[in-house]
Image (cartoon, rainbow, N blue to C red):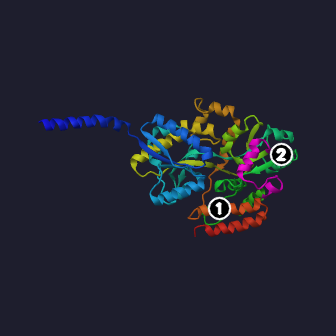
Amino acid sequence: MLRRDLVTSLAATTALVAAPAIAQSTTEIVVEYSIPDLFKTLHEEIAREFTKANPQYKITFRAPQPGYEEITQSILRAAVANTLPDVAYHGLNRQRIFVDRGIAQPLDGFVASDAQFREFGHAPGLLDIGKVKGKQYGIGFSLSTPIIYLNADLAAKAGANTDAPTTTWDGLFDLARKIKALGGGAQGFHFDWDITGNWMFQALVFSYGGTMLTDDEKKVAFDSEAGKQAISTLSRMVKEGTMRDVAQSVALQDFTSGSMGLWGHSTSRLGGVTKQVADKFKLRTAAFPITANGRLPMGGNTAMLFAKDPAKQKAAWDYIKFATGPVGATMMVKATGYFPSALKVADDPAMLKDFYAANPNHVVAMKQLPKATGWYAFPGENGLKITDVIKDHLQSVVAQKAEPLATLAKMSADVQKLLPA
C-alpha cells in the first residue's frame, strides 16, 4: 500500500511538473530566404509579430543567400542531404525547378480549407504566379514590375517636364544626354540589365511583344524581331543613353547620392532608395517603356512549402499565411517597394490605403499590372546555366565588345543547345 501510494504520488508530481513544459512547448519552423540587404530586417520583424500572435511556434532562420540563384542551389543541396527548411522564399522564375524535381509541397489543400486565407483578398491573378502545372506551390510575398526612377531636380534643370515624365526610350536617352551635359559630374542614365534571372532582359523582350521560347518550349524565341529590338535597345543605352559598364552597387550609389538622373530598376528598391535620398532631391518614378502589344515580367518571390511532416506543414502554412497576409504584406510594402499578393490591403484604411495616398511613387508599379506576365523559367536541368549564358552574352554588348545582333544570334544558338531535346 505504502509503495503503491508513493508511486502514485510521484506520478502525480511528475505530471504537475510536466504540465507547464507541455503547455510551453513550441514547434520550430525553419525558414530560408535570400537578398538580405532587402529582406533580413523585414523577415525578422515579421517573425517577431508572428510569434507574438502564435507563441506555440518558433521561427529559426537559416543564413540568408545572396540571391535567387544561390538559394535555389542551396535548396537543391538540402534536398539531397535531407535537410530541407520548412519554408523558403524563391524567385518567381525558380519555383518550377522544385516542382519538376518533386521537392516542393502543394498548397491547394490549405488554400481550399482555410476560410481566413480567402478573406485576405489575394488577387486571383497574383495567386496564379505561384501555380506550376495547375497546382498552387507558392504564395506571393513580394511582387514587382520594372520602373524608371527619376531625379526630378536634375531632370528639371535639363528642361524636362517632371510632372509628365517621358515613357519612351528615345525620350529617356535624350534626357540622359541633357542631364550629363549639365556637367559637375552628373551622370545621365543606368539600366540594371544584370538583375538576377535575366529579369531586365526579359522585360525588354516582353515589352516589345516577344517571348523567350516557343509555346512548346522546344525552340528559342527571343531571336525574333522583338528580341532584336530588345538587345539593340540595350546597346543604345550605352551608345545614346550615356550608360556606363558599372556594377549595380555603383549605379545605386550614383542615383541615391543625387549625381545620376535616370535609373532603370525594379520597384523593389523604392523603399530603401526613398530613405537614402531623403531630402537630397525630389524623387519620382515613371512607367517602363512598352509597346502597344508588350508585356512586363512580374518579379519578386513567393513563399514555398518544403516540410513533409503533416504537423510541420500545418505550422509552416500558418507562418506563410501570416507573412503573405494583411499584417505581413503591410510591413513588407512599407519596408520595400514591392506590392503584395493580397491587394485588398491597398484599399484598407487600417493597412495601406493612407500609405499609398501619401506615397504615389509606390503606385506606378501596380498600375502596370494589367500588362504583367510571368517571369519566365527555362525548362530542364540546364535552367540555371541558361541564365548565366545569357548574362555573359549581354555583358559583351554592354561592354561594347560585340555587336548586338551578332551577339543575339550566338546567344540564341548557345541557349538552344541547352534546352531539353
Residue appearing at x 65%, y 62% in the figure: 388
Tell me how far mark 1 sits from mark 2, CA to CA: 32 Å
**Mark 2: few/some/many CA within 10 Å (<14, 14-19, 20+):** some
Which stretch appears magenta? 235-260
Q: Residue furthest left?
A: 1
Quadrant (top left/top right/bottom left/bottom right) for the N terminus: top left
Answer with the quarter of the image where residue 97 lies: bottom right
Residue appearing at x 60%, y 58% in the figure: 377
Which is nearer the eye, 43 or 193?
Answer: 43
Amino acid tagged 1: Asp
Inspect this view and state whether residue 121 appears.
Answer: no
Q: Is residue 347 magenta?
A: no
Name the residue beneath numbered marker 2: 186
Amino acid tagged 2: Ala
Quadrant (top left/top right/bottom left/bottom right) for the C terminus: bottom right
Q: Secondary structure at mark 1?
A: helix
Instruction: Report the mark closest to the observer, 1 or 2.
Output: 2
- Report whether 14 appears left or right of 185: left
For residue 385, above or below residue 209 = below
* Circle nearer the N terminus (1, 2): 2
Name the residue beneath numbered marker 1: 388
Inspect this view and state whether residue 316 appears.
Answer: yes
Total marks shown come to: 2
Q: Is residue 257 magenta?
A: yes
**Mark 1: few/some/many CA within 10 Å (<14, 14-19, 20+):** some
Q: Position of residue 241 (x, y in %)?
A: 82, 52
Residue appearing at x 69%, y 62% in the figure: 392
Q: Which mark is residue 38?
A: none
Q: Position of residue 22 (x, y in %)?
A: 34, 38
